[in-house]
Image (tube, rainbow, N blue to C red):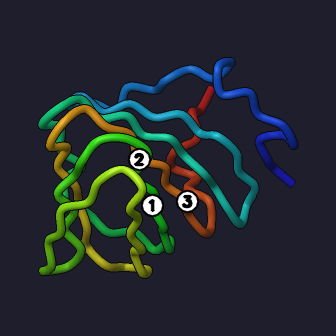
């Protein structure tokens, strides 16, 4: 089975630039589950999109305008949100911030191909 390893030291991971002031690190995964730390510069946008994965996200730092389908909410550090499979969603960083995303199944598209 393809997985990240049993122990992952965050400081040994490299931030991957995904554009527009957004970077991410994959913290751990196997075929069924993936956790990712995503850093946003102030005013960066996670554009509206959908995917077949279920997702739960924890706001580690900062504040974000979060849109899920047609509903928008302001979320701050300590808050979280859930995205069902196939539902459009996106975020705007109102200040520099960090989100921790958990996906099931894992996001194969996030793995860097070598």
Q: Position of residue 56 (x, y in %)?
A: 48, 67
Residue in the picture at 62% in, 59% down:
106
109 sits to left or right of 26: left
Asked whether the residues under the numbered discs 1 and 3 touch, taking CB atoms below 8 Å apart as contact, a structural biologist would say: yes
Callout 1: helix, strand or loop?
strand
Image: 38 above or below 12: below
Query: Which quadrant would the N terminus be assigned to in this image?
Result: bottom right
Callout 3: helix, strand or loop?
strand
Q: Which mark is residue 29?
A: none
* Closest to the observer, 62 or 14: 62
Callout 2: helix, strand or loop?
strand
Q: Please name the residue that numbered disc 2 is placed on.
A: 99
Asked whether the residues under the numbered discs 2 and 1 touch, taking CB atoms below 8 Å apart as contact, a structural biologist would say: yes
Image: 27 above or below 101: above
Q: Please name the residue that numbered disc 1 is placed on.
A: 57
48 sits to left or right of 9: left
Image: 4 above or below 105: above
Q: Please name the residue that numbered disc 3 is placed on.
A: 102
């Amino acid at each position: 089975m393809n997985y990240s390893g049993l122990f992952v030291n965050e400081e040994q991971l490299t931030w991957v630039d995904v554009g527009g002031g957004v970077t991410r690190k994959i913290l751990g995964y196997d075929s069924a589950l993936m956790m990712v730390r995503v850093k946003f510069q102030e005013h960066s946008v996670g554009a509206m999109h959908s995917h077949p994965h279920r997702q739960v996200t924890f706001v580690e730092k900062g504040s974000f305008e979060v849109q899920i389908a047609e509903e928008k909410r302001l979320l701050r550090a300590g808050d979280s949100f859930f995205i069902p499979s196939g539902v459009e969603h996106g975020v705007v960083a109102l200040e520099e911030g960090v989100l921790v995303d958990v996906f099931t199944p894992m996001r194969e598209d996030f793995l860097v191909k070598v």
